[in-house]
């Protein structure tokens, strides 16, 4: 989850730990290593990514992606995850709000 062949960094691991801790109010929040970054899950559904460069992305769909685009967020292509704006990451209430929305998108996404 990052550049091809990217390796996890200490900064990405530390940031992942901060994010998981901050998102505990959502419920059963866990993470695991994936492709040089980390997937973040709520009740088993992946709703966020911390990439190898310690950037946070939340899952979006047709009903939520406009919010990210309006904030100037970049998509983590080809996946439906968008960069979380720094002001959202820095504000606990906003972070929980945006994360809750992303978790709802993840729970609603059809599983293959």
Image (cartoon, rainbow, N blue to C red):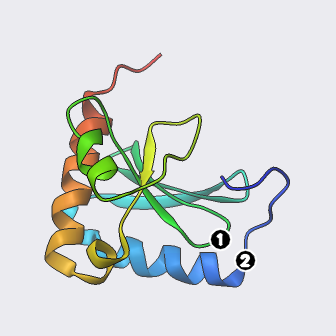
Q: Write the residue at 48% across / 78% down.
A: 17
Earlier in the chain: of badge 1 and badge 2, it is 2
Asked if the residues shown at circle 1 and circle 2 are in contact, with their CB atoms under 8 angstroms apart, the answer is yes
Which of the numbered marks, if any, corresponds to residue 9?
A: 2
User: What percent of the width, then of the height, locates residue 18?
Assistant: 42, 81
Dot 1: what SS? Answer: loop
Camera-side residue: 71 or 78? 71
Q: Residues within 10 Å of mark 2 (few under 14, many from 20)?
A: some
In the image: residue 11, left or right of residue 15: right
Q: Is residue 60 visible?
A: yes
Task: Count residues near mark 1 (Cα–Cα under 10 Å), then give few for <14, some for 14-19, many for 20+.
Answer: many
- Tell me if 112 is positioned left or right of 89 in this view: right
Residue 108 placement: quadrant: top left
Front label number (1 vs 2): 1
Q: Mark 2 falls on what kind of element?
A: loop
Visible residue check, residue 25: no
Residue name at image x 72 percent, y 51 percent: 35
Percent position (x, y) of residue 95? 24, 70
């Amino acid at each position: 989850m990052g550049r091809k062949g990217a390796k996890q960094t200490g900064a990405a691991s530390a940031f992942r730990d901060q994010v998981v801790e901050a998102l505990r109010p959502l419920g059963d929040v866990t993470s695991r290593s994936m492709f040089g970054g980390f997937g973040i899950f709520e009740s088993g559904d992946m709703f966020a990514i911390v990439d190898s460069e310690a950037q946070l992305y939340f899952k979006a769909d047709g009903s939520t992606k406009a919010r990210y685009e309006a904030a100037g967020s970049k998509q983590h292509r080809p996946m439906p995850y968008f960069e979380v704006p720094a002001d959202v990451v820095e504000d606990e209430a906003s972070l929980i709000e945006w994360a809750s929305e992303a978790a709802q998108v993840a729970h609603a996404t059809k599983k293959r």
